[in-house]
Image (tube, grey):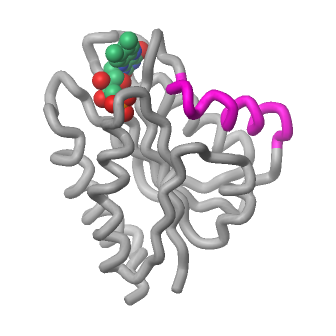
Amino acid sequence: MPTLTILVGTMYGGALDVAEQVKPLFEQAGYSVAISEQPTIDDLTNSQDLTLFCVSTTGSGDYPGNFVAFVRGLQEKSPSLTSLRYGLIALGDSSYGDTFCGAGRALDALLADHGATRLGERLEVDAMETFMADDAAIPWVEEWIESQQLKVA
Ligand SMILES: Cc1cc2nc3c(=O)[nH]c(=O)nc-3n(C[C@H](O)[C@H](O)[C@H](O)COP(=O)(O)O)c2cc1C
């Protein structure tokens, strides 16, 4: 059974909640799902199958605290991620203006710099429009699995 790893960056738990809510959708699609709240570079380089990032933004376009060491490691070790296929759900709030979903956007650019391939478009969930991020994330994941032909069961 292929593995889907969900790497979570969160301050207040919203992104973790999204990960937990979408987990059954991937299980139904034939994946064994692992959620990592303390992601490491090994999670990426060992990931043979599929990776989903659920990452919120804090401060002024900053990465959540639990995600900082991971990003620093990525910048310092600069591993090749050419075998990484990923999706990205960014949580943010458009009332923050220019830094809207800043962490998710910066992560996306960083992964691309390291040769990773994003499947489909990035989802940006705006807390100004969507009270519960799951309401946007669940239909997006259903569509993502369908459009990217990710179903294996
Ligand atoms: C102190 C603070 C700073 C924030 N800064 C930003 C920001 O710069 N850009 C943005 O898009 N959202 C920002 N947000 C909004 C959060 O990203 C949004 O509420 C998100 O849903 C929180 O997800 P989480 O529960 O996983 O941490 C901020 C929220 C707080 C409380």
* Most distant residue in the right direction: 77
Quarter of the figure with residue 66: top right
Quarter of the figure with residue 106: top right
The quarter of the rendered structure image containing the C terminus is bottom left
Q: Is residue 119 above or below residue 15?
A: below
The magenta stretch spans which residues?
A: 63-78
Quarter of the figure with residue 76: top right
**Residue 70 position in % (x across, y down):** 67, 37
Q: Would residue 92 be visible to someone looking at this image?
A: no
Left or right of residue 136: residue 124: right
Residue sitting nearer the eye, 117 or 39: 39
Residue at x 74%, y 55% (from the top left corner): 42
Residue at x 52%, y 86% (from the top left corner): 1
- Ligand 1 is found in the corner quadrant, namely top left
Left or right of residue 85: residue 125: left
Left or right of residue 52: residue 141: left
Q: Is residue 75 above or below residue 43?
A: above
Q: Is residue 115 above or below residue 62?
A: below
**Residue 30 position in % (x across, y down):** 40, 83
Q: Would residue 134 be visible to someone looking at this image?
A: yes
Look at the magenta stretch and give its main secondary structure. helix
- Exactly how many numbered labels are in the figure? 0
Residue at x 33%, y 11% (from the top left corner): 96
Residue at x 34%, y 10% (from the top left corner): 97
Q: Is residue 38 magenta?
A: no
**Residue 126 position in % (x across, y down):** 25, 29
Residue sitting nearer the eye, 149 or 3: 3
